[in-house]
Amino acid sequence: NTRPAMMQISEIKPAIKTQGVFIGLVELHGSAECETPLTSPLGNVSCVYYEWKVEEHWSRTVTRTYKDGKGQTRTRTETESGWTTVAGATEAPAFYLKDDTGVVRILADGASVEAVSSLDRTCTATEPLYFAGGPREEIANSDHRRRFTERTIPLHAPLYVLGHARERQDAVAAEIAKDEQTPVFLISTRSEEEISKSGEVIRKTELQPGDLVFFNTMRRAFSHVGIYLGNNRFIHSP
């Protein structure tokens, strides 16, 4: 559960710089960087992360048997339809978040990633993308329509990260990675304010474990975010 919520609490420090990352929950702002950027397969975007999916639409007519109000056996014809995923993948190698003090490595595996839409298109079998971007074989009962979607974290894109920092095994430095004891690991191309606006203002009694809580500190809104653990306990970066 990563439902955004809004409350007001004072005297909690804001997000830190990469140079000051310590072991534990941290909150960072910066840009997405990578020495060897990826190229997304559908949108050809230079990026540090991508996920894509191809869905194919199908429909079929089925005949069903049922009992009417008098107990008589009847049949009726119905049309069923839907989308089936026929291809897709996620590529999430290690990359870096950079700010004006340095960089920190991000391991996105297991994170909740809010990426940028780089492609959202539906096409028919007469268009080149239909087979060029998807399987050569169609599914049963295909309507010959496919929907292509792709999301990326573009190279140099502004980034917000809330997650657990740990020691790297290959260098004297920290990295941000999935931690089973930390309820939230968020990597977002949106700002704290944008994330908070997708939530709702709630009472303290309505909080649920795992809620993201955006605090009004330092006399400005959205200056800090924490995670509600339950039993009136929060976890937040210092």
Image (tube, rainbow, N blue to C red):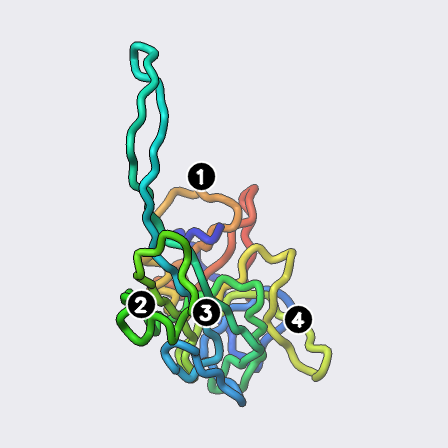
| C-alpha gap between disc 3 and disc 4 | 26 Å
**Which mark is on residue 120?**
2
Q: Position of residue 162 (x, y in %)?
A: 51, 66
Front: mark 1 or 4: 4
| Nearer the observer, 224 or 165 | 165
Q: Work out whether mark 3 precedes mark 4 in sequence or the reverse, and give the earlier one.
A: 3
Q: Position of residue 107 (x, y in %)?
A: 58, 73
Determine whether label 3 and label 4 are within 8 Å by CB: no
Q: Which residue is mark 3?
A: 51
Name the amino acid, label 1.
Thr
The secondary element bearing badge 1 is classed as: helix
Q: Work out whether mark 3 precedes mark 2 in sequence or the reverse, and give the earlier one.
A: 3
Q: Position of residue 85 (x, y in %)?
A: 43, 58
Q: Residue at x 49, y 50 (%)?
A: 1
Name the amino acid, label 2.
Asp
| C-alpha gap between disc 1 and disc 2 | 39 Å
| Nearer the observer, 184 or 61 | 61
Q: Which residue is mark 4?
A: 166
Q: Which residue is mark 1?
A: 205
Name the amino acid, label 3.
Glu
| C-alpha gap between disc 3 and disc 2 | 12 Å
Front: mark 4 or 2: 2
User: Residue 70's image quarter?
Assistant: top left
Front: mark 1 or 2: 2
Q: Work out whether mark 1 precedes mark 4 in sequence or the reverse, and give the earlier one.
A: 4
